[in-house]
Image (tube, rainbow, N blue to C red):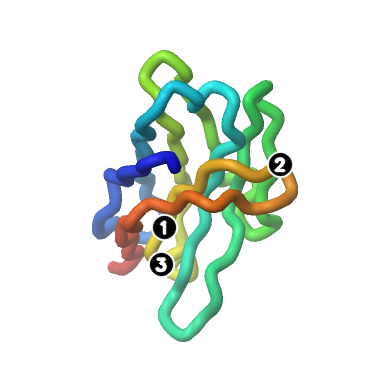
């Protein structure tokens, strides 16, 4: 199973930006579909974005035009650039590996907290 470690979370003001990183172990990273999900207090975990090995991407409607998912197959890392952040983006963000572009894989990171507040 792939080991995933997220970083880059923190406190940011509304309208600000953050970039999350997820470092993955193993030699199969370049073939894996990768994704970002988030879970706010009292809510279910939800899809944010996914990226295929061929760099095809999908996004939740709530983040389209503000967030960008990307990957570096040399560094075995997937990124989530988050711009124009809103208070409703506050959540724990999780990295996911495996599955397909439209379905979730089995491997999860430990999560990183993002708080958007003035």
Q: Earlier in the sequence, mark 1 or mark 2?
A: 1
- Residue nearest the viewer, comparing 68 with 93: 93
Does residue 73 appear left or right of residue 112 in this picture?
Answer: right
Are the residues flagged by discs 1 and 3 in contact, CB closer than 8 Å? yes
C-alpha gap between disc 1 and disc 3: 6 Å
Which residue is rendered at x = 34% and y = 60% of the image? 114
Viewer can see residue 64:
yes
Mark nearest the camera among 1 and 2 is 2
Which image quarter is the C terminus in? bottom left
Residue 91 lies, in percent from the top left, at 41, 67
The label nearer to you, 3 versus 2, is 2
Q: CA distance from mark 1 to mark 2?
A: 18 Å
Residue at image coords 64%, 59%: 62
| Of the image marks 3 and 2, the number of the one nearer the N terminus | 3
Residue 38 % position (x, y): 48, 62
Q: Secondary structure at mark 1?
A: strand
Judging by the rendered image, the residue that carries numbered circle 2 is: 101
Residue 19 in view in this figure: no
| Residue denoted by label 1 | 93
Residue in the picture at 31% in, 61% down? 113
**Residue toward you, 26 or 57:** 26
Where residue 65 sits: x, y (%)? 63, 44
Q: Could you tell me which secondary element the residue under label 2 belongs to?
A: loop
Q: Quadrant of residue 67?
A: top right
Residue carrying label 3: 91
- Towards the viewer: 63 or 78: 78
Q: Is residue 103 left or right of residue 114?
A: right
């Amino acid at each position: 199973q792939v080991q995933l470690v997220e970083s880059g979370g923190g406190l940011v003001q509304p309208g600000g930006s953050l970039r999350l990183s997820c470092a993955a172990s193993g030699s199969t990273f370049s073939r894996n579909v990768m994704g970002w999900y988030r879970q706010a207090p009292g809510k279910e975990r939800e899809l944010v974005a996914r990226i295929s090995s061929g760099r095809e991407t999908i996004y939740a409607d709530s983040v389209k035009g503000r967030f960008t998912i990307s990957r570096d197959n040399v560094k075995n890392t997937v990124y989530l650039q988050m711009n124009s952040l809103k208070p409703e983006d506050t959540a724990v963000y999780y990295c996911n590996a495996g599955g397909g572009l439209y379905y979730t894989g089995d491997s999860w990171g430990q999560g990183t907290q993002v708080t958007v507040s003035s």
